[in-house]
Image (spheres, helix red, strand yellow):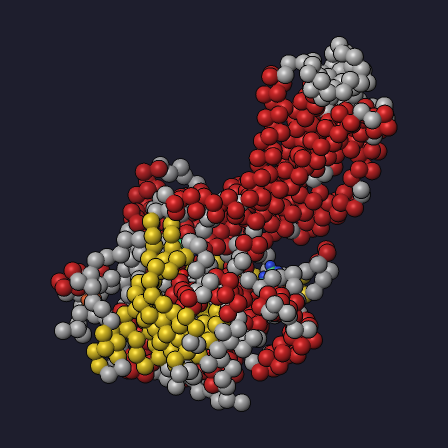
Amino acid sequence: MSLVLEARHIEGGYNLGAGFLKAVDNCDLYAYEGEIVGVAGESGCGKSTLAKLIMGFTKPPLKLVGGKSIVDGIDIYGLSWKERRSLWGKVVTMIPQASMNALNPTKRIRDIIFDVVKEKFPIPPSKSEVLDMAKKRFEEIGLDPVALSMYPIELSGGMKQRAVIAVSTLLNPSFLIADEPTSALDVSTQKLLLELLYTLVRKKIVKTLIFISHDIVTLRQICDKMCIMYAGEILEISDTEAIMNRPLHPYTKGLMESVISLSPSIRKTTLKGIPGAPPNLLNPPSGCRFHPRCPYAMPVCRKKEPSLREVEEGRFVACWLHLR
Amino acid sequence: MAEKIVNAGRLIVRYKKLLIGVIMLSAMVIFCVPGMILYPVDPRAIIFRDLQPPSSTNPLGTDVFGRDVLAQLIHGTYNSFRIGILAGLIATLIGIAIGATAGYFGGIVDDILNLVTNTFLVIPTLALLIVIASYIRIRSELMMILIIGATSWPWTARAIRAQVYSLKAREFVDLAKISGLPRHEIIIFEILPNMLSYIVMCFTLQMAGAILSEAGLSAIGLGPTALITLGMILRWTIVWEAPRIGTWWWFVPPGLIITLIAVSFLLINSGLDEIYNPRLRRMR
Amino acid sequence: MLRVENLTKIFRTGFLGKGEEIIAVNEVSFLLRKGEILSLIGESGSGKTTVARLILKLLRPTSGHIYYKDTDIWDIPSKTYWRKIQAIFQDPYASFNSFYKVDRILKNVFKLFPDKISEEEKDRKIYEVLERIGLDPKEVLGKHPFELSGGQMQRLLLARCLIIDPEVIIADEPTSMIDASMRVILLNILKELSNKAGKSIIFITHDISQAFYVSDRVLVMYRGRIVESDSVEHILFSPQHPYTKRLISDVPKLHEKFKFTLT
Ligand SMILES: Nc1ncnc2c1ncn2[C@@H]1O[C@H](COP(=O)(O)OP(=O)(O)O)[C@@H](O)[C@H]1O
Ligand SMILES: Nc1ncnc2c1ncn2[C@@H]1O[C@H](COP(=O)(O)OP(=O)(O)O)[C@@H](O)[C@H]1O
Ligand code: SF4
Ligand SMILES: [Mg+2]
Ligand SMILES: [Mg+2]
């Protein structure tokens, strides 16, 4: 299988008045054709920033300070901003966080689509061609093409999210990044959306999907591989099943122990969650960034930063408990 | 250092409309306020020869009565500004009061106030102004301000109503209610501060509108007779057929200044809109 | 504590209410007992928030009644009522007025009390409540809302309730916009408030597993109606209404994958 995403040593953040906020620090992420990769972590840990850096969407104050991102064989940072822009939507597309509420309320869905297409092609295809493409895509993802002539407010949350996905995948990008697409939906709508994302990849409408969410239970439903982020760094990457059966990093354990499972005994148990709050990225803690909240913290954790290593076959962890 | 300059450059490019608008407006203000002191010629004094082209004694020449055009322009701009600010203020305040009440209370209060607003909105303002102004015989500056202020509020009320209507559904308003805050405090201290930027934008447009209304009304002879305003200067040029007799120095400058003021307010407004309206700012 | 009888709310839109009708809440009745957590579950748009707003006297019912200790809530002076019934809402970002520092929302509640309270007394009370809820006053006070995380904001809003010390707290999807790791911490506080402090809580959610975690009894709401109400055990093992069954089957589970078939 071929590599669709190869992001190496990605480092970047925001130029703020108070200094440089490094929201993503030395992150490596690979994704193969046909794979769904989940990115999990608490809000503010840098998931959205990582996604933007992968796409090359470095709009100030965001800035890349190191590393490279190769998408479908194209070195993103070898291109100018203008060249990158022409790739978005065609090679790589992001469904931004909360994008379903960013649809222009004064336009019909089909006009929104025309605008998108017009921006991407120097010589845009005719409206009827675009409309045919859109109808086909709407049908593929189980949305009635009637919705094309509706306004965003006339659609329910789930339909809006589907419309956003249809618009984003219209030009058949090989690589799709979905940033928290399920977070604002109720469970039933969420399930439908998960099914849709799953079929997008399985039907090869997109080659690879990166699915970002703060909720590992949602991620685990469709992701082949999972990547856990904390305070701008990747702490653990493995097969989903491996992580679910035996999380190695204490933070991953904490996330799993925060999950409320559906069982009668749940009412008698007291889940712990992860006490404390994520650190301020302008001034991260020394050593392992998780040490102030880690129940297993050792003296070495405060002093030296553990790096991401393969500790067992296919299992990458950054934690002194597993590094000898 | 280089980075600072680049950043400053970026800010300038980003806020160019606002910046140009503010510079133009400041130029107008500097023209009239210190101008009155630096150019202490009485605009009413008939002390020169009439209809003189620009010269070293009269930089913009004289009008048909032999008054200095530059001095008139300085005082006219100042007075027009004053009318614009005060009338704009009145219109904005009425607009806020009616719009916020309608939006906050909703229901029948909203329906009635909406009806009133829409009625005012469909009547052509200028026509209404002409009718009112020709009925009211006292042509004072105050009257002018009140008439303009009292007729131009409807679209501000509309805009404010829509904003309040959407803000009142926000949870902080419910929380304020169940914290026992009285209604007027909720409107004034919770809702209105959240739309301050919007109110400022409405106010800039109202000022531009008021200055144009003054010019229009005065030009057709309904202006404050005893006051020099840009509109009154235009009025005299029309009465004495300045364009026909070719005294460009008399009629071009006031028209130009009115246009510049209106354009600068519009630029400020649209510059502010770009900053505050996330949709225009999003993903460029 | 609270008795809700045949509560109905119809929204009318359009000029003089002549437009479309939306029946948001339809003949809803239930009881809230002292010290219990009652969950109200339903998908979005099912009318949960409308019920909450009706109970909070933020909306007038179209028909039906709500009684607090046998008195119709509309016969109780609002300030008195709001000292007994308080709430925390879904969206922490919208719950704070971004124009002010967070302290304001805590100080505002003292307006509910008839007596004059000195500033020191207010500060003392605020510190005490923040600590009780596991928030460091130094870390949160004097900040603007956007400087805090969603979890911190929701806990501040819970602290706001505790300053008032009401008998009933209505929690309208308080966890839906915060991280899972913070979610259980907030839910644990709610549990403790009911177990230790004897508060009655109406917990509104679309996630049945959260309802099961905190509550004693569950009401399932669907299109404005309550379609099922029972103890957690009964609902989990023998859900009656098809909608309840769907809610249970749609919850993603940690140790299982959804099975999707390609069509
Ligand atoms: N536009 C921005 N300007 C400044 N800081 C930002 C911006 N966007 C995000 N950040 C900061 O970067 C960090 C990571 O944010 P983000 O990537 O959005 O996290 P996540 O998507 O995991 O919630 C946070 O500390 C956030 O405050
Ligand atoms: N102020 C209102 N005006 C008109 N319709 C409303 C209003 N508030 C809620 N609704 C409608 O009532 C129904 C129930 O809404 P809501 O109580 O917010 O549901 P939930 O909280 O379960 O998502 C929805 O169809 C919604 O559109
Ligand atoms: S390195 Fe130390 S502090 Fe960090 S997660 Fe591992 S044990 Fe905990
Ligand atoms: Mg994000
Ligand atoms: Mg709701």
Q: Residue at x 34, y 73 (%)?
A: A29
Report if residue C162 is visible in the image.
no
Spot occupied by residue C148 in the image (x, y as percentages of width and height): 37, 53
Q: Residue at x 43, y 47 (%)?
A: B6
Image side of residue C188 versus residue B274, left or right: left
Spot occupied by residue A84 in the image (x, y as percentages of width and height): 48, 66
The number of callouts visible is: 0
Image side of residue A25 versus residue A60, left or right: left
Report if residue A62 is visible in the image.
yes
State whether residue B156 is above or below residue C169. Answer: above
Spot occupied by residue C18 in the image (x, y as percentages of width and height): 73, 60
State whether residue B129 is above or below residue C230. Answer: above
Res. A243 image quadrant: bottom left
Q: Nearer the viewer, residue A303 or B74?
A: B74
Image side of residue A79 versus residue B244, left or right: left
- Direction top: furthest residue: B47
Res. B155 image quadrant: top right
- Direction front: furthest residue: B55
Q: Nearer the viewer, residue B174 or B65?
A: B65
Q: Residue at x 43, y 73 (%)?
A: A74
**Which quadrant does the N terminus of chain C fall into?**
bottom left
Q: Nearer the viewer, residue A66 or A265?
A: A66
State whether residue B207 is above or below residue C148. Answer: above
Q: Residue at x 44, y 87 (%)?
A: C259
Spot occupied by residue C115 in the image (x, y as percentages of width and height): 41, 39
